[in-house]
Structure formats: structure tokens, C-alpha cells
Amino acid sequence: MTRCSPPEPPPLPALTRAEDEFIDAYLGMVDLLGRANPARATHTYGALRAAQALVGRATALRDALALMHQRGESEVHSGTLTRALRMLDGERRAERVTVPQDPVV
């Protein structure tokens, strides 16, 4: 009996180390904002912990962007970074930051 494996996802686009850290810190902030979103949070303690962790993620985001700037990476290659965000499930993760739609009655 042969087992069918799910197809391999395409590889992430080539990113500089700073771009990789930029994406990682950004998605980390998105996840934390989603946990702290008053429209989606279920407990104050979880939202509080997420809010406390935002400081560290914001610092990491700032540091990644500062490193890019220092290295002369003056442009954000949004097409490449968008592909990376999509491959890392960024759209689903960012949905938790939004206010849910009212159910249609």
C-alpha cells in the first residue's frame, strides 16, 4: 500500500536575513494583536499577555527595519514580501486583527 503525501509547498522567496526578520516580527505582532483584539478575545488575561508581548515584537520589527536601512536596503520589495506573507498564512493570521462582520439575518 502506498501512502500519499500532501504536495510540498513551494519554497519561500529568497529574502535577506533582515527581510526574514521583518516578516517574522510583523507576523508575530499580527498574531499578538489578534489575541488582544477586543472583538475576538475571550479572556482578559490572554489579551493582557498578548499586549505585554507586543513591546518585544515591536522592538524586533524596529530592529529589522533599522538593519535593512543601515545595510542600504532602502526599498521594501512588497511583491516578494507579499508572497512570503501568503506562504506563511499571513492572510488568515491578519483576519484575527479585524472586527468580525455582523451575521446576516
Image (cartoon, rainbow, N blue to C red):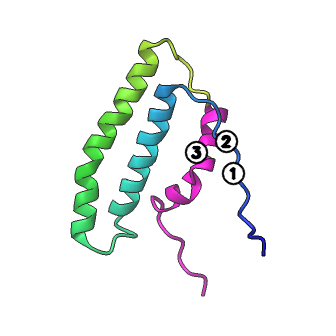
Q: Which mark is residue 91?
A: none
Question: Disc 2 and disc 3: Cα gap in Å?
Answer: 12 Å
Pointers 1 and 2 in contact (C-beta within 8 Å): yes
Q: Residue at x 47, y 62 (%)?
A: 96
37, above or below 17, in the image: below
Q: Front-most of 79 and 6? A: 6
What amino acid does circle 2 point to?
Answer: Pro
Quadrant holding the N terminus: bottom right
* SS category of the residue bearing label 1: loop
Q: Earlier in the sequence, mark 3 or mark 1?
A: 1
* SS category of the residue bearing label 3: helix
What amino acid does circle 3 point to?
Answer: Leu
48, above or below 22, in the image: below
Q: Front-most of 105 and 41? A: 41
Q: Residue at x 46, y 34 (%)?
A: 22
Q: Front-most of 36 and 2? A: 2
Give, as a single range, the part of the protein colored magenta: 78-105
5, above or below 20, in the image: below
